[in-house]
Image (cartoon, rainbow, N blue to C red):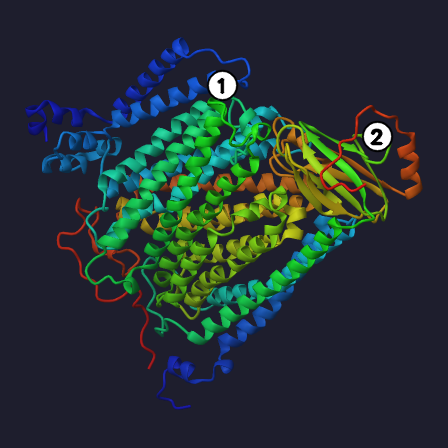
Amino acid sequence: MSDLRSPEQSYFQSKWWKRKDVREVVVLWIVFTGLIGYFSTKFQNIAMGKPASETMENVIHLITTFTWASSPVAGFVAALAVEALIQKRHHGDNPPPEADHEISSSPRATALWLVISALLCLFALVVGLIALQKDDQALLDRNAIHVNVTGQQWAWSYDYPGSTGVRSNVLHLPVDQPVLFHVTSKDVKHSFWVVQMGVKIDANPGYVTETAVTPNKIGIFDIRCAELCGLLHAYMQNKVIVESKADYEKWLASQPDTGHTTWKAEGASS
Amino acid sequence: MTTFATKQEKKALIERLNVFTAFALGAISAIVVWRLALAFLPADAELSPLFTREDKITLLSMIAWFIGFMTGIGALIGPFRWVQGKDLSHEENMFYAGKDMGIKRYFRYTTDHKVVGIQYLVITMVIFGIGGILAMLIRTNLGKPGGGWIHPQAYNSIVGTHGIIMIVGTIIMVTGPFGNYIMPIMIGARDMAFPRLNALSFWLIVAAAIPLIWAQFIGGISTGWSAYNPLAGQAPLGMDGYIMFICIFAISTMVAGANITTTVVRMRARGMTWNRTPIFIYGVVASVALALPAFPVFFLSQVMSGMDRALGTSFYNTALGGSGWLYENLFWIMGHPEVYVILIPAVAALMEMAPVFTRRPLFSFNVAVMGIAGISGLSILVWAHHMYMSGWAPLLSAPFMLTTELISIPTGMLFLVLVGTLWRGRLWMTVPALSIFALLWNFMIGGITGIYLSDVPADAFLHGSMFVTAHFHYTLMGAGLTGAIASLIYWFPKMTGKMLNKRLTWIAFWLTQIGFNVAFMGMFFVGLQGQPRRVEAYAQIFSKGNLITTIGAYTIMVGMLVLLHAVISSWRSGIKAPMNPWQAKTLEWTVANPVPLENFEVLPTVTSDAYGYGKASS
């Protein structure tokens, strides 16, 4: 180290991994990645509560995975930002002296950044496609029971094909039994959302859409309309009661024939 | 001016037209057409749906308002002359440019880009003021669980109106004031390529505002800003106001887009090659160039919606062979590019400021340009991610997931440019510099939550919930509005000749940023808990998150009022600004305060890019 060199010169002549600010960024990066990943997943898990189906477990798993995959990126940006904030701040009405370098690009940093962001993007895509494939498989399950869902302003009603014309305003489902919903609407667009089971599909007038899920917990869960459908959209919600197979059969048998001829949805095979 | 006005009748007419004659002629036309339509329009055939005759009358009156207003402001004088085979004289053009006219030029069809810029700035602030009041009504109503004190019909209308006017406000917030005032000076031009189109684009927005206000008195916009059919088909007459508003605004955006694009392509100063063109210009051009294909589709979607309502067509009516999915497609083909129309210029403005406030060159100019171009290109291919759960085309989920997630790559480039510029800079701690950090923070959260939403299985849970609302507020407000406010502080000295009060803007910055993060973190929380969007009442379990959001919203309101106070007081009696207060190197800082009518006496020649900061190190 020659005495003649200014601090800037010795900075740029030192190996990059020996520089003080680079080392600070690395430490900050590790700390921030941990903090962001930990608190974000904590926040998400507290909010999302207990899942009531494997589909919802997958949703929570996906969101957790994405959070951990993106926290190094967020942590890195945060580390660079904090490093910029703790270095050489200048207050006042006049500009500070110009920076001690005129670096206007770095092909290496750019290439590295692009490769990493492309890999992360690919990772997100593959993870998403695998989960999507599972959801699509569920639609083809031959053992599924069928439920026809009709939205109208501002209520849901449920028909049970194969029963004696049973129609209910509270959805009943047997536990651990795949179920395929055929969803439509009588008037405007609604969106059928079984919250704790992580499934949703729009109810369109004139069309039948489908979604499938296997509830895996006994209990009472929420169904809400997720598409603004007019005056009382906020109140368009009811419950789904998931019960044992025996209780479900008992309930179904106890229901009167409401006289509604069960509409047979396109693609409904039973 | 007065001498030539007294000489000839027609010149006197030009001089007499202003915003008051416009309003008067617009109102008279609307009333006359309304009375005529009431008297002569035949009653509906028995089979036609409800409201059709009333819809015809409403739409006709609104069209009459529009034509009357535009005639009254003087938009037709130029075309009228051309029909006669003449053009305006030089004196008349100078009059149009607002030469020696003082404050009056802001109330006329003035073509000077600096006047249009100020007009846009004021109308943007008015829009944000009204939209903000509506937001406060929404948040106050949602302060406690169960139904609020606002009637559901009125509540839905407030939500819809808040949505659409904030969308319009954010679309124009950067390209309007700064794209018009600063951009031509920044590229070294004397005015826009089409000065009269510039005036037209502004006054169209004023003309559009009235149908929207009108709509509030005839049933409101109870469909949310997206106005999905068939809900919009059964909505009250207020929907016609929405349709008219969108149609006029779409024309305004198309006109502005053509004008700005032409100006930048054709009128850059000698020597300003694409490599030397400031990054802000790229942002503005990308924004308006995206709007150019997007807004005709928006226009069309609303024309079809209006025809379904008034003429009994069935573009969107399933019972008669149409499809609501058609509307959704048209709407989002506009709607997804549109979010980048909002975001790109705001981010580009902060990229423009980053070198100034770190005193070093912009890091990787080429990457910044590629990022902007990449986002623009991809953004027209992602619209159906808004329709994953619509059932329209389940097989397209995977390809749209691909295009949507690909956008994270060019978006990442913008982050690289910003953090790269901050690295080893000399940070000048001003509010615009702090805004760069705020943008990184908010845009990071908005961007990552966008990845969750782009993923189809996760979207099956998140779609239509408050999570989505929080996500797009993080991008459009947390990133977009932050960039726009930073632009206001940065260019305020050039636009008004005064410095914006530093202490007040600093207070406003922290209040809005803290309030914003509190408000929308609370909203993420209730979204993940399962609260749908656009609800007027909610269950007990959502009460904590909603209360936090409401508290955050009030904090934002206080911050915005402080900012408003700073703008008004500094504009009236602030410290006089030097010509180049930030010691920046772009061309707008080389002209005097106040900027002369034709900006440059001698047009500048450019020999380098505008980011030559930093000393050589060896």
Q: Which residue shows up at 38% across the image and 30% down it?
A: B208
Q: Which mark is residue B52?
A: 1
Q: Measured from the top left, where is residue B486 in percent x and y?
A: 40, 51
Q: Which mark is residue B446?
A: none
Badge 1 crowding class, 10 Å Cα cut-off, few under 14, some 14 to 19, many 20 or more, is: many
Q: Chain of mark 1?
A: B
* Residue B104 in view: yes
Identified by mark 2, the residue type is: Val
Identified by mark 1, the residue type is: Thr
- Residue A219, quarter of picture: top right
Q: Which residue shows up at 60% across the image and 62% down it?
A: A70
Left/right placement of residue B161 relative to residue B589 reads: right
Q: Which residue shows up at 18% across the image and 24% down it?
A: B16
Is label 1 in a helix, a strand or a loop?
A: helix
Q: Measured from the top left, where is residue B423 in percent x and y?
A: 44, 69
In this rendering, the answer to whether B505 lies above or below B108 is: below
Is label 2 in a helix, a strand or a loop?
A: loop
Q: Which residue shows up at 28% across the image and 35% down it?
A: B200
- In the foreground, A75 or A171: A171
- Residue A57, quarter of picture: bottom right
Distance of label 2 from label 1 (alpha carbons): 39 Å
Q: Chain of mark 2?
A: A
Asked whether disc 2 touches disc 1, contact meaning CB atoms under 8 Å apart, the reply is no
The quadrant of the rendering that contains the N terminus of chain A is: bottom left
Q: Which mark is residue A166?
A: 2
- In the foreground, A112 or B440: A112
* Residue B507 in view: no
Q: Measured from the top left, where is residue B379 in percent x and y?
A: 47, 52
Badge 2 crowding class, 10 Å Cα cut-off, few under 14, some 14 to 19, many 20 or more, is: many
